[in-house]
Amino acid sequence: MRTTTPIEELDLYVWEGKADIVERVARCMASLDVEVIRADDTAISAQRIAARPSIAVVSVSVIDTGALMLRDWQATHGLPVIWVGAAPRDNDPTMYPNEYSHVLPLDFTCAELRGLISKLMIQMRAHSAQTAGADVLVAESETMRALLKEVETFADCDTSVLVHGETGVGKERIAELLHRKHSRYGTGPFVAVNCGAIPDGLFESLFFGHAKGSFTGAAVAHKGYFEQADGGTLFLDEIGDLPLYQQVKLLRVLEDGSVTRIGSATPLKVDFRLVAATNRQLPQLVKDGTFRADLYYRLAVIELIVPSLEDRGAVDKIALFKAFVSTVVGEERLESLPELPYWLADSVAAMRFAGNVRELRNLAERVGVTVRQMGAWDAQRLRRLLAGSGGAQPQAAAEPVAPVVDRSKWDMAERSRLLAALDANGWRRKDTAQYLGISRKVLWEKIRKYQIFDEEPATGESE
Ligand SMILES: Nc1ncnc2c1ncn2[C@@H]1O[C@H](COP(=O)(O)OP(=O)(O)OP(=O)(O)O)[C@@H](O)[C@H]1O
Ligand SMILES: [Mg+2]
């Protein structure tokens, strides 16, 4: 069986320590369009990494000599890392900063290496497809438009902002927007930290950084998140999950505007804008004694509430759905297909998404893959897909169904007239055309345009 390797156009940075890893990697990659670059802490160009897919292959033996340097390197470049050798001894979770870290044995075979690289490239591509649509911020509903107005109003002031909303509503997207629109901090870095995922005992080192030589292995100085965000925005996601003792430390930095690295006595000035997000009710946490009131008041100088998808209604659901489907199918290809079928738009509009935009996005992407593969809005398959889609449940029939589609956009009025006319004439097209005062050809075109037979029972009448 012939398999195609999805390895194409790739830079491999190899940091080999003591073994002959660079040579072996180069041999394995010889027939592919892969550049194997001998890497140390200086050999990596951020511009090049931004322009080409890149992966690092690092010998575990460099951990002793360059662990901290490597952390900086990963934090700065965000490179997926393939570790060669036994799993890093100290089991330090910061050595695995993202989902792309993998380990290969020291005597790896070419097949193993290529297999792992292919897998990483597929993951990286999927990730960049996910973030590719990230620039489009869909906001068709009144509630979202009102929120964007608030963002405009508050973007350019320096005070902290608390973004509140259910899971998956787009809090981070709003934080990014606040950052980009800020004239002073907007050109600086946007450093996003998930406060719910900080390993125990690593808060200080991650947030405050280390001075060089502050402990065994600290071969170089390491900047913490506060310093990394200097001149930009520090986005603290899931702030409600930050334990009390860490809240105190955060508060102190906000009050002093300075940080002191571990092992150093010199405070360093930091200037960043803080945006925090949570899906929890902080005032309740304050009452329960698990969130400091002073930190809450400091964070919530401005509070932005991102509405749930249910509160945004059908217009946003459909607009988001179309945008995500289009990202997967491709705009050009989508334009060559008929419009989004009504039954599909209506079904999506009537669904409840407990996971909000994220859940809708997952569904839309699966629909997109089906449409791309089939080259059509395959009603049978898509209906099955919708019916089986995890938590996205259609609204119960007894509940009032909100106005479903943006009628002006969808020419619903004309479609309804058409349906009424067909009904009134027993679905006989000749009579209906006469009734409407249009030719049978025009009627036929309209029926096709509005895909009426997609959902109506066959009439048995032939043209
Ligand atoms: N208005 C929008 N337009 C386009 N995409 C959006 C919009 N809002 C959210 N998304 C997408 O939905 C997904 C979830 O968004 P995001 O991570 O910002 O949500 P969140 O509220 O921070 O989630 P969590 O509660 O899990 O932290 C992302 O893929 C994001 O790009
Ligand atoms: Mg988030």
Image (spheres, helix red, strand yellow):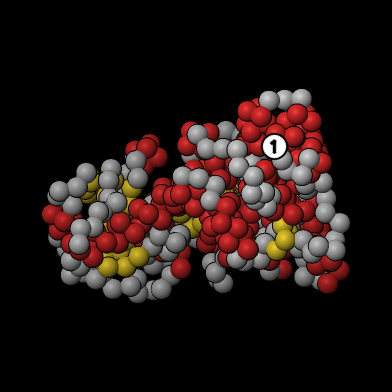
Residue pointed to by mark 1? 429
* Quarter of the view holding residue 249: bottom right
The reply, left or right, for residue 7 in relation to residue 221 is: left
Point 50% across, 48% down: residue: 371
* Relative vertical location of residue 207 with respect to residue 190 in this rendering, above or below: below
* Quarter of the view holding residue 141: top right
Q: Work out which quarter of the rendered image holds the C terminus and state it.
A: top right
The reply, left or right, for residue 426 in relation to residue 131 is: right
Q: Position of residue 15 (x, y in %)?
A: 26, 55
* Quarter of the view holding residue 82: bottom left
- Residue 317 appears in view: yes
Q: Work out which quarter of the rendered image holds the N terminus and state it.
A: bottom left
Point 41% across, 49% down: residue: 125
**Camera-nearest residue between 96 and 462:** 462
The reply, left or right, for residue 307 in relation to residue 111 is: right
Point 85% across, 63% down: residue: 398
Mark 1 residue type: Arg
Q: Position of residue 77 (x, y in %)?
A: 41, 47
The reply, left or right, for residue 47 in relation to residue 261 is: left
